[in-house]
Image (cartoon, coloured by chain):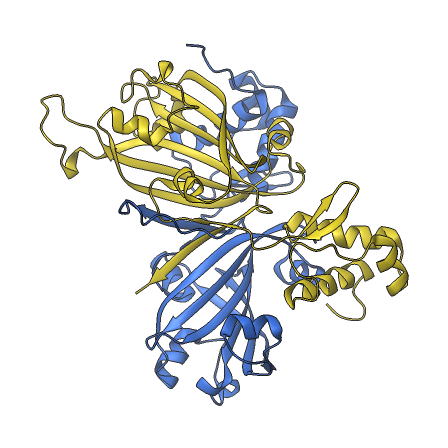
Amino acid sequence: MEEYKLRPGARARELLEGFLVEYGLAPGDRLPSERALSQRWGLSRSTLRNALSLMEEDGTLRSRIGAGTFVAPAKYTRSLQGLLSMSQSAAGQGRTVTTRLLRLEQAECDKHLAKRFGQMLGYPLYKIVRLRSVDGESVMIETSYIPAGRVPGLEKKDLEHQSLFAILEKDYGVIPREGDEKIGITYATDEEAALMGVEPESPLFWIVSTTYDQGGQMMEYCRAAARPDRLRITTVMERKLEGAITEYEA
Amino acid sequence: MGPQSPLYLQLRELIRSKIENGEYPPGTAIPSVGTLAEKYGIHRLSVRSAISALIGEGLLKSVQGKGIFVVGEKLEQDLETVGGFEQTLKASAKHFEQRLLVKASRTAGPLYASWLNCLAEEPLYYVKRLSLLDGEPLSLEEAYIPQWLVPNLADVDLNVFPLHEVYEFYGIHLLRGEQSLGITRLDSPDARLLDVDPRRGVLTLQCVRYGSPERADGAPAGPGDEQPVEFTRTHIRADKCDLSVHFHR
């Protein structure tokens, strides 16, 4: 059987990732110089530099001009299964979430939202737009829609220092039970780019979720744009029974 | 987004909302570049730039000689089944095929040794495949598998048997997988294979699947026998497929 020969770029990338693992480099640790690494592995400087810049782009490394290349802080990790709020799951990772309320307004269902909520045009909603940061670094912009009738007076609540789901549960008795989430890619608009500190048009996770309460009623529809260099999305897969695996939509 | 935003961005959001509210239904062509340029009094280049961003997102699709069409619901990929991508796609009604690009031998090296919990010198199989749905590239998958687990993989025709069936031949039952999702950019050769713009991102799923091989003495494997069976990295075109998950308390 043939021996696989990696392309130089892929080899550089694998060697760098392997180096971090093998030497147990932690966030904040500095990598050896480009010259040392390219000599160590017999790679050209440009191949190595290209691999380093891709790893910076995906949030594994960070470079500071004149100081070198460092291991980036661990990404905030969000498991899609389970219903932990962002503040709860961040706390579990020893991180702190801060929230900036960008907009909180009454809105009406347009055709698209009416379809999502299974309601008629004009069905009243609260629209809440929040910038979420972890340890002071912006991670995502979430736009939530909540049926206004379920949460009268929501505009008087402190949505910057309390989790939205905690308010829903504590003040309105609306308890999340289950939901669905879909993930794709979107490209940053100028506004998203400015708020999250990325270049316009850079790729972002596009996470659309629907959450149902204890009575099976839809309680939230949420669209979030998130920085992939700061958010890692994880799931655990289990073996399912034969025949139970046909979840798809074409 | 407001009156001061660049016109191509305003037009992009306008087209998006017309798709969302059904004014431009799936499967139909939107007005031509020339028509849109004239209607809104903006330059054709701005119209093109608004449209190309939406093509990148998978909302629109350009068909040579026919126009720009609205794409219907994207395929959805369930993230929770251990058989993974391959199994869900096979279950879908569309025509799914896989092309074997590489099947070769290599050593684990420090990176895959850590994923597969083996020695850096451990011989692995490296398998690279392209998945197509109705003839269009959808995903590119690389798998790394310890050779001792499936010693005859070299002779197995992977165009006939999917990998998880091959594992079953060897008495290995996949039990569980842990995956994480990111966005990456492909190098040019891989971008060409997947037919994507190398400057754009693809969804990248990294996954370790665990299973329990049958014991040498024939006794049934227990939970303590669980070990990594494969590490896979799957690059998925986000304009073709959304990933989905169901969550509950």
Q: Is residue A81 visible?
A: yes
Residue visible at 53% across and 29% down? A13
The answer to whether residue A7 is above or below residue A85 is above
Chain B shade: yellow
Chain A shade: blue
Picture coordinates of residue B139, whole percent (x, y):
52, 36
Q: Is residue A151 visible?
A: no
Quadrant of image for the N terminus of chain A = top left
Residue visible at 62% across and 32% down? B191
Picture coordinates of residue B75, whole percent (x, y):
52, 49
Picture coordinates of residue A77, whole percent (x, y):
42, 52
**Left or right: B246 in relation to A100:** left
The answer to whether residue A166 is above or below residue A27 is below
Q: Is residue A154 or residue A102 the one in the foreground?
A: A154
Q: Is residue B186 or residue B97 the one in the foreground?
A: B97
The part of the image, by quadrant, that contains residue B137 is: top right
